[in-house]
Amino acid sequence: MTQIELRGIQKFFGDVQVIKDLNLDIGSGEFIVLLGQSGCGKTTTLRAIAGLETIDEGDILIDGKVVQHIKAADRDIAFVFQSFSLYPHMTVFENIAFPLRAMGHSRAEIDSEVRDVAKVLRISGLLDKRPSALSGGDMQRVAIGRALVRRPKAILMDEPIGALDAKLREEMRSEIKRLHIEQGSTTIYVTHDQIEAMALADRIVIMHEGILQQVGSPQEVYSHPANLFVAQFVGSPVMNVADVSVKKLNGHADVTMSGAEKGFAFPQELLARLDGAGAKVDGIKLGIRPEGIEVALDERDGYLPLEAHLIEPLGSHDIVDLQVGDEFVRARTRSGFVAAPGTRVFARMDPTQAHFFDAASGSSLGVRL
Ligand SMILES: Nc1ncnc2c1ncn2[C@@H]1O[C@H](COP(=O)(O)OP(=O)(O)OP(=O)(O)O)[C@@H](O)[C@H]1O
C-alpha cells in the first residue's frame, strides 16, 4: 500500500508555468482523478509523479521518501497511456508477462501471475491471440494487465479509455472501478471528462491553468463547489450562473437576476448570511443546478411567472429553458411536463440548492441555507 504526497510542486516549460504550487496528499489505496480542461497540467503532474518529467520546485514523496531524484524505472510505478503501446509481434500472454520476464521471475511464477491478472480483467480466453486480433477495449485490458502484473506501488493512468467509443468507455469505466475495488492499488487517473471522474474517483482533484481548484469526493465537488470554475465544470447540464441583486422585500430575501423585473423569493436569513460572508451587495453571483429549480403549471405562492422556451427531451427527464429578464435559466422537469415552447409556467428556486459566489474572485461565499 502506497501513499503519495506532492509538496509545493512548480513546473515551467520555458517561461510558461504549467504547475503552480501544487500540494496534494494521496492516501494508500485511494482512487484519485485529476480533472481539468486540456492543457491545465494534469498530464505533466502525472508524468512528474512517475518520474517521466522533472519538476522545478517542491517535493514528491512516495511512502514518505523524497523521489524526485530517483529514476522512473526505480520508482516502481506503472503507467497506462491512452495509446495501448502493445508489442504487436507478441501474444497477449507474452505482452502481460513482459515486465515479469524483465525482472527475472521464474516461468512458473510468470505463468501464475499472468493467468491471475487475465482472470481479473476477463481476458483469459485471449492469452494466445496477438494484439491485432483484439478489440480496442481488450487491447486496453491487456495494457492495464501489463501494468498491474508486477504489482506496482501505484498505478497512473492518462486518459486510458479516451480513444474508445462511448459505449465501450462506459463498460471499461466500470471494469477499472471493479479492478480497483478488487486490487486496492493507489491509483491516479487523468481525464477531462467530468462524468468519468465522478464515476471513478474516491476524490477528484480539479485543476485549471496549473492551479488546484478543489479536492473532494464527487458528492462534495458537486454539492459544494469551491468556486465558479468548479461549479460550471462539474455537472451536466452546467449549473445556471447569473449576476443577482439581493434585497429585503415583504419579509423575504428577494434575489433578482440582472435584467429581470421580479426576483425569486428566498428565506430572509439569506441577507444575514451574505452579510456575514462579507458579500458585496452589487457583486454576487447566484449558481443553481437545473434540478434546483422547481417548475409548476399553476400559479403558486412564491413562484415567479416565466415563459418556457427551448425544451430538450432527454428521455428520463426534460431540460426546459425559462426566460428570466434577458437571460435563460435551465430547469429539470419530468418528461413532457411542459408541453410546448411558449408555455407560461411558474418557478421557484430551492434555497437549499442555491450557491452564492463573489463575482470578482469567483470564490464561493460558503453561504448555505
Ligand atoms: N514538453 C513540453 N514542452 C513545452 N510545453 C509543454 C510540454 N508538455 C506540455 N506542455 C504544455 O504544458 C501545458 C500543460 O500540459 P499538460 O499536458 O500537462 O496538460 P493536460 O491538462 O494534461 O492536457 P491534455 O489533456 O491536453 O494532455 C500545456 O500548455 C502544454 O502545451
Image: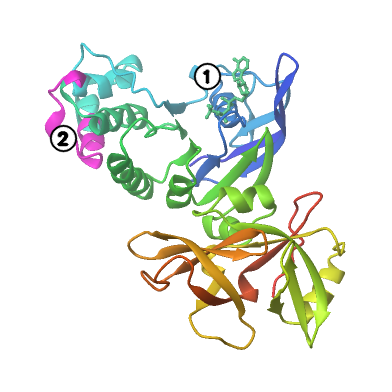
Q: As drawn, is 349 to the left or to the right of 89?
A: right
Camera-side residue of 169 and 305: 305
Q: Dot 1 lies on which element?
A: helix
Amino acid on which disc 1 is placed: Ala
**Which quadrant of the figure has residue 347?**
bottom right
**Which residue: 28% across, 33% down?**
141
Point out the tag, 2 or 1, that comes first from the N-terminus: 1
**Which quadrant of the figure has residue 240?**
bottom right
Amino acid on which disc 2 is placed: Ser
Q: As drawn, is 55 to the left or to the right of 297?
A: right
Label drawn at residue 72: 1
Magenta-colored span: 114-132
Magenta-colored stretch includes residue 120: yes
Q: In this view, does 236 lie above or below 32?
A: below
Q: Where is residue 182 in the image (x, y as percent from the top left)?
A: 33, 48
Q: Can see residue 148?
A: yes
Q: Dot 2 lies on which element?
A: helix
Q: Which residue is outermost to the top?
A: 89
Give the quadrant of ligand 1: top right
Q: Position of residue 302 (x, y in %)?
A: 64, 84
> Is the distance from the Cβ of mark 1 to the nearest ligand 1 atom less than 8 Å?
no
Q: Can see residue 215?
A: no
Q: Determine which residue is flagged by label 2.
A: 124
Most common secondary structure along the magenta stretch: helix
Q: On the rendered image, what quadrant is the C terminus found in?
A: bottom right
